[in-house]
Amino acid sequence: MIELDVIGTPAPQGSKRHVGGGRMVESSKKVKPWRTAVTAEALNHAFGPWPYVGVVAIFRLKRPKSHYRTGRFAGQLRPDAPLYPAKYPDVDKLCRSTLDGLKAGGAFGDDAQVVILEGLKVYADGREPGARIRVYPVL
C-alpha cells in the first residue's frame, strides 16, 4: 500500500465546455492545480505493476466562515455547524480529478484498473486542505 498526502484545494472534475475549433476546456479553473498537485505527489512514490488497484481518498475541505462564531468567540465553531461537508463539491467528481492525477503520476496505467474506490469528504478542521490517498493492489 502506498499513502500520499496531497496539500491543496481539492477540486472536482466536472463538465467541459466547447470553446470552438474542436477544443474543450474544463469548466473549473481549480481542477488543473489540483490534478497537478496529485500528480507531483504520486511521482514521489514507486508503484507496483498492479493489474487491479484499490484507491481510498479522504478529502479535507476548508470550512466556510459562516460555520464559525463571531465576536469574542471568533474561531469557535457554531453549535449548528455541520459535521460533514454534504454540499458542493460532489465526492464522485473529486475522485474523478484525483484519479486522473494519480494516472498521470504513474500510480496505474489506466483508471479502468481501479476496481475499488472509496471517497470521503471531511472538514480540514486544524489541518491543511488536501487529501490523504491510499493506493493498494487488489488480490
Image: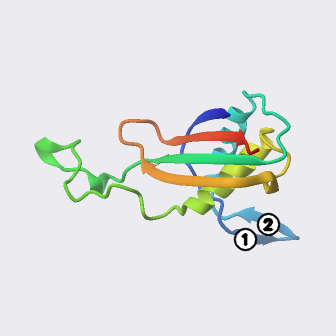
Q: Amino acid at mark 1?
A: Arg
Q: Which residue is mark 2?
A: 24
Q: Residue 82, how many percent across, how many down?
A: 31, 58
The number of discs equals 2
Q: Is residue 76 left or right of residue 52?
A: left
Q: Is residue 75 above or below residue 117?
A: above
Mark 1 or mark 2, earlier in chain: 1
Q: Are marks 1 and 2 in contact (CB under 8 Å)?
A: yes
Which residue lies at the image location 76% right of the left edge and 44% below the top edge? 139
Quarter residue 13 falls in? bottom right
Gap between marks 1 and 2 measured at Cα: 5 Å
In the rendered structure, which amino acid carries the disc numbered 2? Met
Q: Considering depth in this image, is 5 or 71 the residue closer to the camera?
A: 5
**Which residue is labeled 1 in the image?**
17
The image position of residue 99, as x and y in percent, is 71, 50
Compare residues 31 and 122 and report the one nearer the observer.
122
- In percent of the image, x 36 and y 54: which residue is there? 64
Outermost residue on the left side: it is 72
Compared to residue 51, the image places residue 44 above or below, namely above
Residue at (42% x, 36% y) in the render? 127
Answer left or right for 2 relative to 109. Answer: left
Q: Position of residue 91 (x, y in %)?
A: 55, 59
In screen coordinates, is 83 left or right of 99? left
Instruction: Give the residue at x 56% y 49%.
Output: 10
Quadrant of image for the N terminus: top right
Q: Secondary structure beneath disc 2?
A: strand
The x, y position of residue 109, in whole percent, is: 85, 46
**Helix, strand or loop under label 1:** strand
